[in-house]
Amino acid sequence: MTLLSELWLVTAKDLRIEARSRVTLAQVLPFGLIVLILFAFALDPDRGLLPKVAPGLFWVAVLLAALLAVSRAFSIEQANSARDGLRLSGLDAGAMFLGKALAVALQLLALEVVLGLGVVLFYDLTPKAAEVLVPAAVAATLGLAAAGTLYGVLAAGLRVRETLLPLLLLPVLAPVMLGATRAFEAGLGLNGSAGEAWPWVELLALFAVIYTTLGFLAFGPLLEEA
Amino acid sequence: MPLVVRLRSAVCLLGRFPALAGVDLDVGEGEIVLLSGPNGAGKTTLLRVLAGLLPVHAGTAEVLGHDLTVDRRSHRRELSLVGHDTFCYDDLTVAENLRFAARAAGRDGGASEGAMVRLGLERQRDVTHARLSAGQRRRLALAVALAREPRLLLLDEPHAGLDAEGREVLDGVLRAAPSEGRTVLVASHELDRARALARREVAVVAGQVTGLAAAAVDAGVAPAPAVTVEALP
């Protein structure tokens, strides 16, 4: 089997489990929407503040939802010692990492589409400059998924993984939060022009490349030690 | 007979406790070896070491020609372990769990279908693991192991949880293993049943394997004699 076919085997397995269990659809997505609505309540749409801070609130909601998605990606490996089955499968560890990260990324992208619609609806924001927003969202999502999968396996074997994962992951994801928010602000014309978003998109892409490389190399040893 | 397993003074520590305390063991190709011994003796640890799930901290360990002290991952595609858990996904069906395991080991869909039929799980093919009974889950774990078409089959209490029919199916799988080019190590407390299938028995006592020099008995000619040596301090 090639790396690509092994990667897709893991991605398809995780997505099939998600399609059947519907945790993202029934729990993570409503959670993200509730976060958006709570921000709307807290900041009061009448004051005109919400459209200005919408990019930051959107990415906070995505970040919190990403924590749940990553946690879920590894909790399915805990039941019935499926993690040992995965270790014994003979699949390349790098392919396992890429496969799990891709499954998380695809779920997050779907989630971002719905949350984006929520922002338009609740925060009275007009979407524009898709040529900037889409690459920024894709780069940020890949970074979130790669770093999340790496730290997810790190915490997987621990009894306190549910509480430890956010503690480990949130500081690491600060550059994604910053870069994605700034890119969206520029793309939406809230802070500078659309052209000013590209350095932030490059930062997001760099983050994604670094954590994908780290995860590809470290996933195997971390899975063995988890 | 080429060796599939060769351990010399192999030590495995669980924390600071020596779960395996200097094990010597040779297993030849096509052999069925019974691991007997009391609870906590180290049978499960030994199987997990052979599968590469636990490290060898001292001594030498070669499995399927791979030195486990150097690399305990590359031989895994050629073996299957049936442990206390099923290693399956609750939200995947019987067919999906089998297909995933077979494809991960580089086998085609025929291998997973064949294993499903062999373990009598055709009627449950579209049932998720979470909805299977305990006995059906046990059958699925065995089917997953066979779908990988392993050269080395490691079985930890495989009869536990199976009904009478399931036990007969399992015994048939074990009897056929040598002719299918498969080597089997089976840890069991059901000694009468397992002895009738094994060519050789080694006792695991206090993290040490005894009976290494026990003569192999040809399968089908006579049940293997049990060889037990007192645990070393």
Image: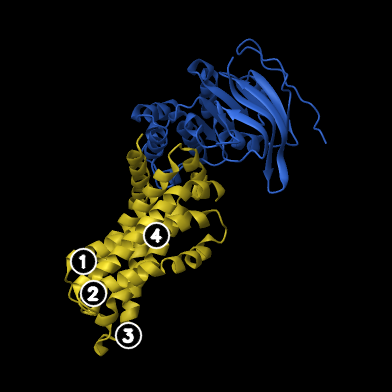
Chain colours: A yellow, B blue
Q: Residue at x 59, y 33 (%)?
A: B50
Q: CA distance from mark 1 to mark 4?
A: 25 Å
Residue B17: image x %, image y %? 72, 45
The residue where tag 3 is placed is A43
Q: Nearer the viewer, mark 3 or mark 1?
A: 1
Q: Residue A33 appears in which quarter of the rendering?
A: bottom left
In the displayed orientation, state which residue is furthest to the bottom: A47
Q: CA distance from mark 2 to mark 3?
A: 22 Å
Q: CA distance from mark 1 to mark 2?
A: 9 Å
Q: Nearer the viewer, mark 4 or mark 2?
A: 2
The residue where tag 1 is placed is A132
Subunit of label 1: A
Residue A20: image x %, image y %? 35, 50
The residue where tag 2 is placed is A186
Of B55 and B93, nearer the camera is B55
Residue B228: image x %, image y %? 76, 25
Q: Are marks 2 and 3 in contact (CB under 8 Å)?
A: no
Of A112 and B35, nearer the camera is A112
Q: Which quadrant: the N terminus of chain A?
A: top left
Label 1: how many residues lie within 10 Å, few (<14), some (14-19) or many (20+)? Answer: many
Of A30 and B162, nearer the camera is A30
Amino acid type, label 4: Ala
Amino acid type, label 2: Ala
Q: Are marks 1 and 2 in contact (CB under 8 Å)?
A: yes
Q: Residue at x 79, y 26 (%)?
A: B229
Q: CA distance from mark 4 to mark 2?
A: 28 Å
